[in-house]
Image: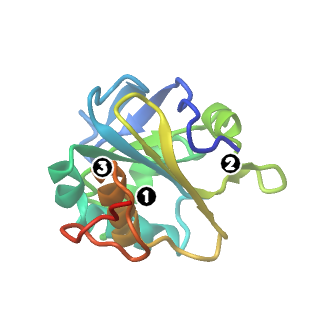
Amino acid sequence: MLSIGASFPEFQLTAVHSTDREKAFRDMSREDFGGFWKIFFFWPKDFTFVCPTEISGFGKLHQEFLDRNTQLIGGSTDSEFVHLAWREHHLDLRDSPFPWISDIKKELSENLGILDKNAGVANRATFIVDPNHIIRHVSVNDGKIGRNPQEILRILDALQTDELCPCNWQQGENTLNV
């Protein structure tokens, strides 16, 4: 698995941006959102149970991420058509404010090292990537355990200080001086 300090791989994938079938699909690449921090978070499968709680949780914090010059990007190895159908049929996902990439060929998941070889799907992985495409944080949860989007926001805040931050540090608190 790629780790901290590695360059996030280049990719060209289709993403679902809304439930409006006229505007739903757009190609995305690593170069989109230039100058932004990016949170890439992958889930194993659409139409499951833990995943929508996370997607909705990130969606509720979307403006807070944008306020930090950060773009959320979700994704799985499902097709863009499955993504669209899930968004159309799940009330909590319908208005998701960020794109969902479709890694149907599993190339990005494999390049990141998060493809579960047995299940053939992406692991529940999160990458915080700086504006220069450098991975600054990686976490992977067991498939049964949902992420804490508020904790990802806290880690982003700490990374953006570029300072030493103690355990449980919160935005606005003092950093460590050594």
Q: Tag on residue 86?
A: 1
Mark 2: few/some/many CA within 10 Å (<14, 14-19, 20+): many
Instruction: Give the mark nearer the N terminus: 3 vs 1.
Output: 1
The residue indicated by pointer 2 is 114
Residue at image position (34%, 65%) is 176
Q: CA distance from mark 1 to mark 2?
A: 23 Å
Vertical order, 159 against 90 (above or below): above
> x and y percent of residue 80 in the render?
47, 40
Q: CA distance from mark 3 to mark 1?
A: 33 Å
Q: CA distance from mark 3 to mark 2?
A: 25 Å
Q: Nearer the viewer, residue 93 or 22?
A: 93
Residue type, numbered disc 2: Ile
Vertical order, 152 against 28 (above or below): below
Query: How many numbered badges does the structure rendering display?
Result: 3
Residue type, numbered disc 1: Trp
Nearer the observer, disc 3 or disc 2?
3
Residue at image position (33%, 48%) is 162
Q: Are marks 1 and 2 in contact (CB under 8 Å)?
A: no
Residue at image position (34%, 66%) is 154
Instruction: Give the mark nearer the N terminus: 1 vs 2.
Output: 1
Determine the residue located farthest toward the front in the rendered image: 178
Residue type, numbered disc 3: Gln
> x and y percent of residue 163 in the render?
34, 53
The answer to which image quadrant residue 89 occupies is bottom left
Vertical order, 168 against 45 (above or below): below
Left or right? Give the position of 140 relative to 88. Answer: right
Nearer the observer, disc 3 or disc 1?
3
